[in-house]
Amino acid sequence: MEKVSTLVVSSPNVQYTDDFILSDYEYEETLVTKNGHELLARPYRTSLKIRTGRKVGKVGVMLVGWGGNNGSTFTAAVLANRHHLSWTTKNGKMDSNWFGSITQASTVRLGIDDKGLDVHVPMSQLLPMVHPDDLVIDGWDISPLNLADSMARAKVIEYELQQKLRKEMAAMKPRPAIYDPDFIAANQADRATNLIKGTKYEQYLQIRADIKDFRDKHKLDKVIILWTANTERFCEVRPGVHDTSENLERALRNNDSEISPSTIFALAAIDEECCYINGSPQNTLVDGVVERAELKGVFVAGDDFKSGQTKLKSVLVDFLVSAGLKPVSIVSYNHLGNNDGKNLSAPKQFRSKEITKSNVVDDMVESNQILYKPGEKPDHVVVIKYVPYVGDSKRAMDEYTSEILLHGTNTIVVHNTCEDSLLAVPLILDLVLLADLFCRVSFRRGDNHEWTSMHSVLSPLAYLLKAPMVPAGAPVVNALFKQRGCIENLMRACLGLQPNHHMQLEHKVPFLMKELHTGTLFSKDSPPTKKAKLAQNGDQ
Ligand code: NAD
């Protein structure tokens, strides 16, 4: 692809200042009301001003579970890309890349050229985003191994690349972390020797001190905290403990046994005004945590990276249901042999994973009442087994059976073998980069002067998460391409561009086709509002 350095939108609806991109945006929806048997669809429009901060600043990321497979692989990937490292395998010379990251390795359709052909740009070029090379990394782990040894333990990175990274990563050592054997599997106990002692409140204070220390040491503008530690069991949500920020504070000070380590990390992050992202399934982000985030104007997002089997499920079921086929049975088996699999071999931790994996088709099923009666769902079973030999190379086997025409059946079987952490790490990167971006976006109505950030529960990150959290009362979207459309179109809105509609009328309506071919289409009735100009390297 042609290298694009800057994207400039040329439109009366968009203004660039030193600090911001300001867009005047007409947000359009259709209000549907029901009157007896009549459905009334009424288009409506909301005039918004959208402001995106252009100054990216210096961003740090702190990983909880830094020494795990994901944490060590993430660090290795950032360093390998930063130093443009190459290594040799039996297949020849390999170069570093960010495949699997939507911000770094996917493109967005920007518009059309004068021949009516699609023009795509890297997603990272749409709006000012942190460059992965510039991320500063730190973190905590209950295991004391330095990052080089963690990387070797994970057995994910190719040997020669490990050798090239070894020196730099050996100097990185996870900070002591909070260990509560009641929340992760008993089989993790032997690695838990790098611990913060004291009461839960003292542990919370230590995490806050760690965040401050990291921020000050590297003079960071922003720190994002991301949990990629072991899956915890669900905490038992109790009224008077987890329901409000105040109750949570009291319970924390009282050393309440149902305050999980991850909830302590989340509270410490929020109180340090850091965005907190939960990459595992457990219910860290209880109501009291969300209330705290809202009070502090901080973002939280979760739960559980959507990396492999569930990602495919959220595409396949969407395809089946939108094709008018009726999935009636979805059965998913997994086996894996990494430490995540070992932890998930304990029933309570497996249960957390089972919950986040199980609701992933609900929105697609509920969208089609021709196929499903209200409340009806396909049979859906998820099995996970621990098989040490396969290590990080997870096997996922899925069987999708659908009812088709006149009650025939159609069964699709999918077998997927993939190194789990090499799928999850690009998602960690995207979560951090997109969270940082969306923290810089704010909205106001044309007639109001006060800018408002997005809701504290950062649901636009849903594409990257298995069980996306949404603000109370908002619908959960699992369908992958809707989730991606949300990210893309939000970014377009920040640039005053309408959502991608994929109609391509220039190639379907004869008089438009003719105008396109004679070169009169764009001069005719399109105001400059829809024109975007790509400034090539050095143009600006
Ligand atoms: P891992 O077991 O290799 O790493 C987890 C690390 O967390 C370990 O080093 C462990 O010592 C550490 N840890 C445990 N409790 C801790 C605590 N309280 N504080 C700090 N550190 C702690 O697992 P992984 O493969 O890196 O996966 C990490 C998490 O991501 C798991 O919960 C997993 O379910 C989730 N996840 C992974 C994928 C994927 O890899 N494709 C997808 C979705 C979700």
Image (cartoon, helix red, strand yellow):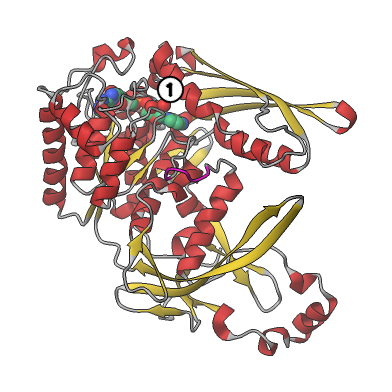
Q: Which residue is mark 1?
A: 352
- Whole-percent x, y for residue 423 in the image: 48, 36
Q: Quadrant of residue 310?
A: top right
Residue at position x 36%, y 64% from top? 442
Q: Is residue 228 above or below residue 199?
A: below
Q: Quadrant of ligand 1?
A: top left
Q: Is residue 237 left or right of residue 390?
A: left
Q: Please identify the dominant SS of the magenta region.
A: loop
Q: In front: 317, or 149?
A: 317
Q: Secondary structure at mark 1?
A: helix
- Res. 103 visible in picture: yes
Q: Is residue 500 left or right of residue 209?
A: right
Place residue 45 in its image quadrant.
Answer: bottom right
Residue 345 in the image: state x and y as whole percent. Answer: 43, 13
463 lies above or below 24 = above
Q: What are the residue bounds of the magenta stretch?
A: 471-475
Residue 483 rendering spot, x and y as whole percentages:
54, 48
Is 149 situated above or below 219? Answer: above
Residue 473 is inside the magenta segment = yes
User: In the image shown, does 79 or 224 lie closer to the viewer?
Assistant: 224
Q: Quadrant of the N terminus?
A: bottom right
Q: Residue furthest right?
A: 406
Q: Amino acid at mark 1?
A: Ser
Q: Is residue 170 visible from the viewing direction of this image?
A: no
Residue 491 position within the rendered picture, expressed as x and y whole percent measured from the top left = 48, 62
Left or right: where 342 falls relative to 361:
left
